[in-house]
Amino acid sequence: MAAGLAALLDDMATLARMAMANLDDVAAAAGKASAKAAGVVIDDTAVTPQYLHGLRPERELPIIKRITLGSLRNKLLIILPLALVLSQFAPWLITPLLMVGGCYLCFEGMEKVWEKLTHHTDHAAHQPKLARGKAGEDQVVRSAVFTDLILSTEIMVIALSEVSEEAFAARTIILVIVALAITFLVYGVVAIIVKMDDIGLHFAARDQRATAAFGRFLVAAMPRVLTGIGVVGTLAMVWVGGHIFVVGLADLGWALPVETIGHLEALTTGWVAAGFFTWLVNTAASLLIGAVWGLLLVWGWQLLPLSDSDDGAAPVVSQVERT
């Protein structure tokens, strides 16, 4: 009996080790899939605070909570089931969908750059007037959740491309982890950013000189922080979009861009910190290709007649009238 018990315990230990190894694999895959979506995540973080402009301070966190729940519904109830069905029954569609998403990222990023260069960024006069009170908040939430649906679709498709070879159960778990982790990361950071100026005002009112000075610094720094996040988000969108586009071209049979980048990367072999310079070459090349392709898409869009009718249309980010 003792031998049988020992064998049973040994089997249980083996199963436990296998389970832990599988969990490690799932965690690693989830981390890799999340990292691939970094550009969209940064842009999501940069976009969301715009929707909270003009809200009363006490309503900011409740609105962020509602947007967070809407984002979770987008990812878990709409995008995830569709992504799993796609990966199970039509995996060949993943690369074309990724390329469409990559083109959108290049277009969206370079459209922001083009508007900045041509000074066509002031859409305030064209924005719809929001209702008062709860109706206005509901309008803000709907607009933010719709924007999140677009960005979340890109995030989940990028993540799906990284785990498409996994078993169905592992693929599901990984995508759920990615959805939860990215949602709470994005809106956690958004909550901190949005409340940082209130924290600064609180500190600025304190009697201690150093504390008050730190509070004034926070208040003065937040507009620059938001601007910086927006710039990084734009660059990340173009970089990720360019990378997706180049890799997609290789998957569809035209490997020249990928091979050219590989030759450039090979030049860094033997350098000090060669890994960093290899990454830098790949990132710079992807950013350049994404920028050129994005500009071509922007110019092509401007030639379309329907682009004139949409000129000035902007997401609902104007002030909610205070009750």
Image: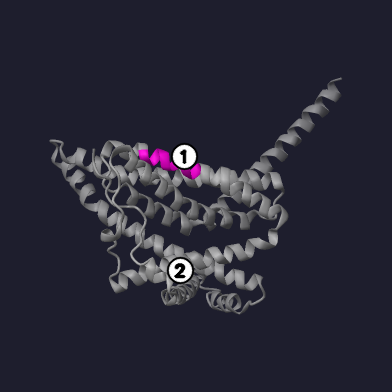
- Toward the viewer: 267 or 200? 200
Quadrant of the rendered image containing residue 139: top left
Judging by the rendered image, the residue that carries numbered circle 1 is 69
The overriding secondary structure of the stretch rendered in magenta is helix
Judging by the rendered image, the residue that carries numbered circle 2 is 107
Q: In the rendered structure, does residue 64 fall within the stretch colored magenta? A: yes
Q: Tell me which label, 2 or 1, sits earlier in the chain.
A: 1
The quadrant of the picture occupied by the N terminus is top right
Magenta stretch bounds: 63-72
Residue 225 at least partly seen: yes
Type of amino acid at the residue the image marks with label 1: Leu
Image position of 248 (left or right of 293): right
Where residue 301 appears, as percent x and y from the top left, is 44, 73
**Number of on-image labels:** 2
Residue 150 against residue 277 in the figure, above or below: above
Residue 260 against residue 30 in the figure, above or below: below
Where residue 217 appears, as percent x and y from the top left, is 20, 49
Q: In the rendered structure, does residue 66 fall within the stretch colored magenta? A: yes
Residue at figure coordinates x 39%, y 46% from the top left: 189
Residue 275 at least partly seen: no
- Toward the viewer: 241 or 31? 241
Image position of 232 (left or right of 30): left
Type of amino acid at the residue the image marks with label 2: Phe
The quadrant of the picture occupied by the C terminus is top left
